[in-house]
Image (tube, rainbow, N blue to C red):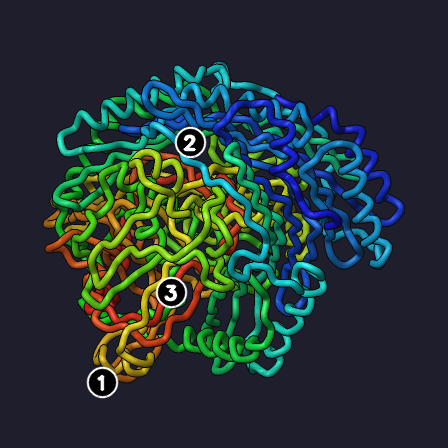
Amino acid sequence: MSDLRSLEADLERSLRRLEPRTKFAEAFAQAETGQEVRFERKTTGVTREPHLRGAVIRAWGGSRWIEAATSSLDARSLEAAASSLEHSLTKSAAGSAPPGESSTLRKEWTDRPARPGRDLSSEEMIAFSRDVFGWATAVPGVQNAQTGVGWSEEERFYLNTAGARCYGVLNRMRGGCLAIAIENGRAENDYAFFGSLGGQELMGYLNERRVTETARSAVDLLHATGAPAGEIPVILDPSTAGTFAHESFGHGTEADQFVRNRSYLRPILGQTVGPESLTIIDQGSYPGGWGSVLFDDEGQPGQRTVLVDHGKFVGALHDRETAAALHAHPTGNARRSDFLSRLFVRMTNTYVEPGDWTLEELVKEAKHGVLLEHATSGIEDPQGGQMQLKVNRGRLVENGELTTVVPSVALSGKVLEFLQRIRGISHRADFEMSPGYCGKGHSDLIPAGTGGTYLLSTAVVGPA
Amino acid sequence: MSAAASTAFDAADRLRAPGPWEIFGERSRRYEIHLNGRSIEMIRGPILIEGYGLRLFRPRDGGMGIGSQASTELTEAGVRAAARDAEELAKYSAFPAKSIDLPSGKSGTGDGPEVCDPNLWDRPLETLEGFVDALLQPFEGERDVEPSFGSVRATLTETTITNSSGLRVAYPHTTAWLELAVKASGGPEGAAPGEYWVNDTVRRLETRDLPDRVREWSRLARDVRRAKSTPSGELPVVLPSAILPTILPAVIGFRFTGSARLRDLAPELGTTWAAEAVTVRDDGRVPWGIGSSPVDDEGSPQRARPLLDRGQVAGLLYDTRHAGAFETRSTGNGWRGRALIYLDWRRFLGPPVNTTSTLSISAGKDGSDAELIEAAGDGIWLQQLGWAVPDPVSGAFGGEIRIGYRIRDGKLAEPVRGGTLGGTVMAPSGHPSLLRNVAAIGSTPVLSEWVQSPTLLIRPLTVAGQN
C-alpha cells in the first residue's frame, strides 16, 4: 500500500500557495488497493483495483467553491492543479471566509483488522468462492451461481489551511452468491451477500446453511405465483426496512436539499411524523459499517445523528455550508465519491432502531398482506415525498400466517402516510445491517449501509 | 489539450510482454457546472484523468487465462507494474476460449459516426456556460416553475486502442450529461410542490430546442401536482421512446449475448420471443448515439447487427472473449464503463463486457403517438418510472409511476402518479412479456440514450394503484 502521508509536504505547499488568495483551502488525496475473485461454472475471474491515486484541491472563491483534481500525484501535477486554482482565484473576490466551521481535527486512524483481506492469497479466495459455488449448485434445480469475495484498503488523507490533518485507512471485505435456477427457458435468481469494514472473519457470513437457503429460494421463485397488486399490509424484512430508512428519512434529511428548498421534510422539522416506536439514525461511526467514515471529506469525524426520535423528526445531515445556513453543526456527512467527484451531503449508515415485536406477532397483526424480502433497490423523491422499494421475492400473509412465495415486488408510497401506518417493529435479535451503494441524483455512488428489523405498515405493491 | 493523445500507444511502447495483449487508453478532460436554483453553485474543471486498461491473454489448461490491470502510471516502471499484475492474474483466471482473435488494422477519426461535438471539444467551459444560460433563460417565462437542483457535466475524451495484432485506433468523442429537478409550486394554498426529474446523456449539447423542452418539463412538473391515483389492473400501456432506455438494454443487452449463451441463458436462434411486428437491431453507428463509435472498446468495427426479426431471434452479440469461446467472430460488442451508471470518463478502469451499443427498434405502421393512444382505448401513458431496475436474468422490471397519464376513450386524460407498473421484458413461450405483448409500434423512431425506438403500445402490463 502506498502511504499518502508521504505527499504531505507537496499538498501543504499547494495549500500555502493559495493562502494569499483565499481565506480557506483544503486538499483531499485518495488511493485504493484491493483484489476480487468471481467464480462461475465456466469462468474464474481475478481482478485488482486499478493503480489509481489522485487528489482534489478545493478553495473558497468568495462566493462559491472552485476545485481542480488530478490523477497524478507527482509534485508537478499538484503544482499545476494549485496553479489553475490560483488563476481562478485571481478572477474572483476572495475577501470573505467560507460559511460554516472549518475542521481543525488532527488525527490518524491506522488500526488494521486482525486478519486483513490482503493476507488472503489468490488461491484461498478462489477456494472460498468455489466452496460457495459448490453449496449453491448442490441444490437441485440450480444450474449456475455467481460467487465471489473481495477486499479493499482505501487510504484517505485530508489537510486544510485551518490546521486539520486527518489520515485513515478503511479496510473493507465483501462477498456474495447469486444462485440461478433455469427451467424451460425461464430463469430466476436469488442472492446473499455481505460487506463491512473488517477482515477475513466476515467471510463466515456466506456459510453452507445460508447459501443453501439462497439457492433453494431461487428454485422456489421459478414456481412462484403472481405477486400481489394493490394497497395491502406489508412487512419489510431487515434489508428492506434499512432501504426504507435510507429512502424515506435519509435523502430527505440531507440538508443541502433543505437549503435548495427541495425537501418536503423541511417544513415539518420538529413535528411528530410516526409512531413512538420509530427511531431512525444515521451513523458514520457505526462499528464496522459498510458506509462508516473515519472522517468526512471536510475533516469532520463520523458521528451518530438522530433523524427521527420516537416518532418525532428532530435532525438533519449537514456539511459546513448547510450547517451554517440552518444554524446547526456539521455532522460528518460531507462525502465525495472519490477524488474526481464533488462533495455533497450524503448518508453513511442509516437504520431503523429495533422495536419489541416478534415476526410472528407482526404476521398475525397483518393478517392478510405480504412479507417483502431481499431488498434490491430503492429510490426517493425528496420533493414529492414518495418512495419506491423493490425486493427480489415475497411471501404472502394469509390468515395471519406466512404462505406462498411470490416473485419480485415493488412498493410505492407516500413516506408520511407509510410512517403513520406503522403498526410494529421487531426486536433487536432480528437486526441486520446491509451494504449498498447510494447515488446523489443519478451519479456519485458511495458505499452506504442500511439496517433495521422487521417492520409492519401498509402500502401499494405490485409485480416488478 | 495540445498534442493528440497517444496513451495506449505510449503504454504499448513500454510494455515488455509477449502477445496476445490489448491496451485501451483514454485521456479525458471533464468540466461540470452545478446549479442551486437558477444560480451557479460550483464550477469544476479541468478535471484531468489519463490512464489505460491492459489485458493479457494466456492459453492455459485448454482455455484462456485473462489478466487485466488498469493504471494511470504511464512511466516505464508503471506500465511494467501493471503488466506484472496482469500476468499474475492471468494465471488464476480461467475462460473457456481456446484462442482470442483480436482485431487488426487501423482506423482514423473520420471512419465512424459523428460522436464529437466540435464546440464542446474546442471551448468546453464556454459551451457549458452557454448551455446553462440557454437552459435557465426559458424558466423566466414559466410562472411558478423553477429548477431546484441540477448539473451539466461534459467529458471530452481521446480514446486510443492498440493490440499485439497490429491494431492502432484513435478517435475523439464527447459526452454531456444533464440532470435537473424542475419544481412547480405556488398557486392555491395547500397544493404541495411537484417535481419532474430530467436525466439525459447525449453526445452533443444543443440549445435550439431548450425553450420547447423547458416548456414540456414545466408542464410535467405542474401535472405532478395535480396527478390522481393510479388505477389497478392489467391495462394497455403506451411507452414513449424516452422511457425505454431504463427498461430494455439491461435485459436484452445481456440475454442476446455470448455472455448469456455461456450461462445457458441466451435464446435459441429462430425461436420466437416477441410479437411478429417487433424487429430489433443493435446498431453502433447511429449518429450522435451515446452507444456509437467507430469501433467498440476492443477495436472491432461498428455495424448494425440483427437481434429479433419479426419476433424471432436472428442473432447474438459477441466480444472477442465470447467469440473465442464459441469459435465465432466478434460482432463488435465489447464495451467498457457499463456499470450501474455510465462512467464515461473512467472507462479504462474496468475490462470490457459483452453487451449492446444502441438498441434500434424498427418503425412500425401504427402511426403517431395520438394514434397509439387511440388504439390503447383505456389505459396508461407512462412518462416516467422511479427506477425500473430490470433484472438481466429473470427479465423482471418495474417501479413506481412518477408521472403518467390516464388514457380514456382513446385520448390522454388526467395525470396519474404513485402505484407501480411492471412485468417481464422477455419470457419463453407460454409466459407473457413486454416483447410478446407489443400490440402496436409507432412510425417514428426517436433516439434516447441507448435506445432508438418509436413509441410502443403494450397490451397489457400490470398496474397497481390505490384504486
How far apart are the two marked residues, 3 and 1, measured between alpha carbons? Answer: 23 Å
Q: Amino acid at mark 1?
A: Asp
Q: Categorize mark 3 by other alpha carbons within 10 Å: few (<14), some (14-19), many (20+).
A: some
Tag on residue B243? 3
Q: Earlier in the sequence, mark 3 or mark 1?
A: 3
Q: Viewer-nearest of labels 2 and 1?
A: 1
Could you tell me residue B268's position as x and y percent? 19, 47
Q: Chain of mark 1?
A: B
- In the rendered view, tell whether residue B79 sits above or below residue A249: above
Q: What residue do we see at 34% from left, 24% from top?
A: B63
Marks 3/1 same chain:
yes
How far apart are the two marked residues, 2 and 1, measured between alpha carbons? Answer: 52 Å
Q: Amino acid at mark 3?
A: Ile
Residue at mark 1: B409
Marks 2/1 same chain:
no
Describe the element under mark 3 as helix, strand or loop. helix
Quarter of the image where one finds residue B48: top right
Q: What residue do we see at 52% from left, 57% from top?
A: B112
Q: Chain of mark 3?
A: B
Residue positioned most to the right: A20
